[in-house]
Amino acid sequence: MTAGERIKICGFLCLAPAACLAARLFYLQTFRHGELAGKAESRIYTQTAQNTLRGRILDRNGVVLAESLRTYAVAVSKKNVNNAEGLIKALSETLDLRPADIKKIWREKKNFFYVKKHVSPPEYEALESRLHSAGLRGVELEPEYTRIYPFDGIAQDILGAVNSRNRGLSGIELMYDKELSEELKSRRVKRARSGGIIYDRSQLISPETADIYLTIDAMGQYYTESILKKYARQYGVKSAFAIVQDSQNGNILAAASWPARDGRALPFQFSYEPGSTFKTLAVAAALDTGAIKPADIISLDNNKWTISGITIRDHQKKPALTISEILEVSSNIGAAKIADKVGAKTMYAYIKKFGFGVRSNVGFLGEQAGILRDHTRWRPVDTAKAGYGYTISATAVQIVSAYSAIANGGTLMAAHLIDKIKFADGRQTPLAKPARIRRVIEEASAAQLKTMLQNVVRLGTGKNARIAGYSVAGKTGTTEKLAQDGKYGRSLHIASFCGFVPASQPHFTILVVLDEPEQALFGSVSADIFAGIGQKFLDLYAVQPDIPQEDAAR
């Protein structure tokens, strides 16, 4: 073999590996480019989709009732793990999880699985530091948002709840889900070796959610719920609710339900026969139309009065009562006779004018309109019974708004629960501007009625509603409920009280309702609750006393 041939062979042997390598590279780059590029990208990039960002819900004073907290979801991609035992130890110690629980799900899942969600920022920082210092790989840390309610359940029946993706499920969260939420789309981001997400500046999105401001006063709501819960538990009621309204502008300052459930707001959703609290409205219609005068005396017919073949009974000591006394002792016959004097058509018209038979302006989810049959379907006994709150049904927000109309001099104001919506760009949409729906009764009629309702508290069944230093006007109510056999039974009833304070210059109208207490309470305990809530609101808003304390005790 010549020297030239040997050189050629050596050259071929030297070039052969390079040729094979070149051929391999050509094959990989030409035929497997997409596959390999995808694998490379999967190690550097990942798709992330944060759950829905939500705006805040605040009270009338800007106190936050609901907000979204930035948290993280910790997941494991087994194919990227470089030290399984070390990673399990780091996760268990940092996230306060049992190693056995992590190992169990590790065995069950083929590759990707979540270890823990809603990890707080301090936990996230501790874990990321631990992973970085130990050189552990295979963990993915995904940002998310967790909905929190700082006041530990206060107003939860109104606020409602969200699902795992931060979308509204009930209450205000659902009613204003569109304004509160913003869906952040899936984005392609870089992933650090530790598992953390690396965002480019271009990927940082400014939120476009809105904040919802309620007319509710957070502190007043807390007091209302606390007092209501105390008495509800003490007297073993099936349920209870209370609502506080600004007497002058219709804003709802508190609305509490017991037991409290997400989105179940009984002041708007529960419809019932109002009973004796409705006698006030019968007297209002009669005074305003001139069917009666304050000095009139109504005979009780020996506590038995028959109309349309139905006998209405009373248990009064006097054979006859003045109009004020009818309210003071809560006479059914007296109220029935007053409604009969007004007449079906006019009585129906005034009930409608006071806002019954239609949903309120609040528009809460599941809000009831109540039941009010057209007067053409009333028998004479139906008109009489309407005078003391039977044959119709109403919600708490309807009743409290009607009493506010009496308190403010005769004008029905629109009830409001939402104060305003504030958008991210600074725009605001006010929703609680005082809105006069209509004049229901004349000022003179309202003034006469206020005096009578003060007498109910000073002299009659509402004595438990008295508040030292303040004039109080209101009316007790007790309603027998229909049993399963379709008949009214004394064992099932609703006890209530509705009134306003101070009576001289009303600030707050309050209704308290106890459904099916274990013992017969009538409206006296509801009046106790009224007094407790009223005192808290008077103190909270620094309302000055309007009468000497010795006069209040008389």
Image (cartoon, grey):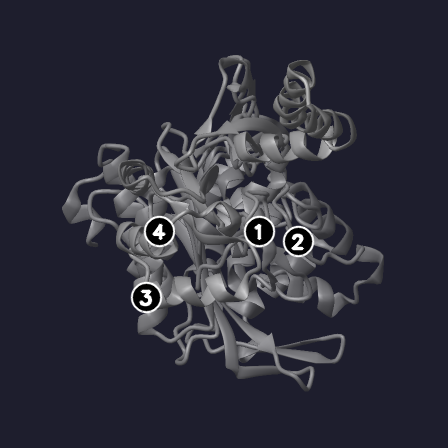
Judged left or right of residue 90, residue 237 is: right
Q: Residues within 10 Å of mark 3 (few under 14, many from 20)?
A: some
- Under mark 1, the amino acid is Phe
Q: Nearer the viewer, residue 151 or 413?
A: 151
Q: Amino acid at mark 2?
A: Gln
- Residue situated furthest left in the rendering: 550
Circle 2 Cα neighbour tier, 10 Å, few/some/many (<14 / 14–19 / ≥20)? many
**Is residue 12 placed above or below 454 in the rendered structure?**
above
User: Which one is in front, 418 or 85?
Assistant: 85
Mark 2 in CB contact with mark 4 (< 8 angstroms) = no
Q: Say whether disc 1 or disc 2 marks the residue closer to the N-terminus.
A: 1
Task: Check disc 3 and report its element: helix, strand or loop.
Answer: helix
Q: Which quadrant does the C terminus fall into?
A: bottom left
* Residue carrying label 2: 368
Pointer 2 with pointer 3, Cβ within 8 A: no
Disc number lying in front (2 or 4): 4
Q: Position of residue 115 (x, y in %)?
A: 44, 54
Q: What secondary structure is found at the residue carrying circle 4?
A: helix
Could you say which disc has been placed on residue 231 in the image?
A: 3
Q: Quadrant of the N terminus?
A: top right
- Farthest residue toward the bottom? 485
Q: Earlier in the sequence, mark 1 or mark 3?
A: 3
Residue furthest front in the image: 1
Residue 493 vs 18, above or below: the answer is below
